[in-house]
Image: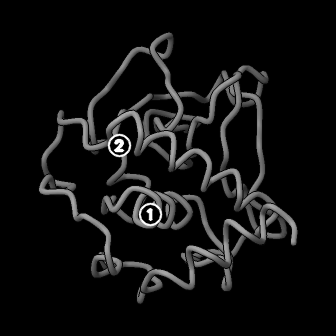
Amino acid sequence: MRVSTFFVLVPAALVVLLQGCATAPPPAQGAVRSRVTPSDPGISRLSEEQARDATVYALGLVGTPYRYGGNTPESGFDCSGLIAHVYRHAAGVVSPRSTSGLRDWGRDIPPQELRSGDLVLFGATSQVTHAGIFVGNDRFVHAPSTGGQVRLEHISAPYWSRRLLAVRRP
């Protein structure tokens, strides 16, 4: 069994899959729901252990097809659907389901303080249009665009470094 298949199938068998792409899903069986809601800006929701779990889970989803509005491994992901799925299933934390909602979720941190599990937010202007999960070693996981797949990118690549708008610690 491929590692990415393991990280997708085993957690999927243990938790309730997300029901809709625009609504917050119910807590997974056995998951501890964060007492902090997405409307509580400035508070870090993830412990270092949860951040590590989210990182490992996100890496296991590399290769999943992109699908606009997608929020499950079976249907594919868009960028915010990937983030919502990862944080929900790996850390039991509910995130906003849009890039604009992610802009105010968690707390701003300086790019030099990035740790695995942090959000990286991108845009060509001041408006956030894309997001990913930082996984360490100058790389992040994201669902890029129609026809693509969830993949790893270097945050220092010219395309991404010019568009980095914010780093958030969920």
Colour scheme of the picture? one colour
Q: Within 10 angstroms of label 2, few (less than 14), some, or many (20 or more) residues?
A: many
Relative placement, left or right, of 25 versus 156 is left
Residue 55, image x, y percentages: 57, 44
Q: Nearer the viewer, residue 66 or 152?
A: 152
Q: Quadrant of residue 16?
A: bottom left
Residue 150, image x, y percentages: 74, 59
- Above-or-below relation of 81 to 54: below
The secondary element bearing badge 2 is classed as loop
Residue 82, image x, y percentages: 56, 63
Where the C terminus falls, by quadrant? top left
Q: Quadrant of residue 101?
A: bottom left
- Type of residue at label 1? Ala
- Type of residue at label 2? Arg
The secondary element bearing badge 1 is classed as helix
Residue 33, image x, y percentages: 22, 64
Q: Within 10 angstroms of label 1, few (less than 14), some, or many (20 or more) residues?
A: many
Q: Nearer the viewer, residue 21 or 62?
A: 62
Q: Earlier in the sequence, mark 1 or mark 2?
A: 1
The residue lying at 66 percent from left, 85 percent from top is: 75
The residue lying at 67 percent from left, 78 percent from top is: 9
The residue lying at 78 percent from left, 71 percent from top is: 5
- Above-or-below relation of 73 to 152: below
Q: To which residue does mark 2 refer?
A: 103
Q: To which residue does mark 1 refer?
A: 84
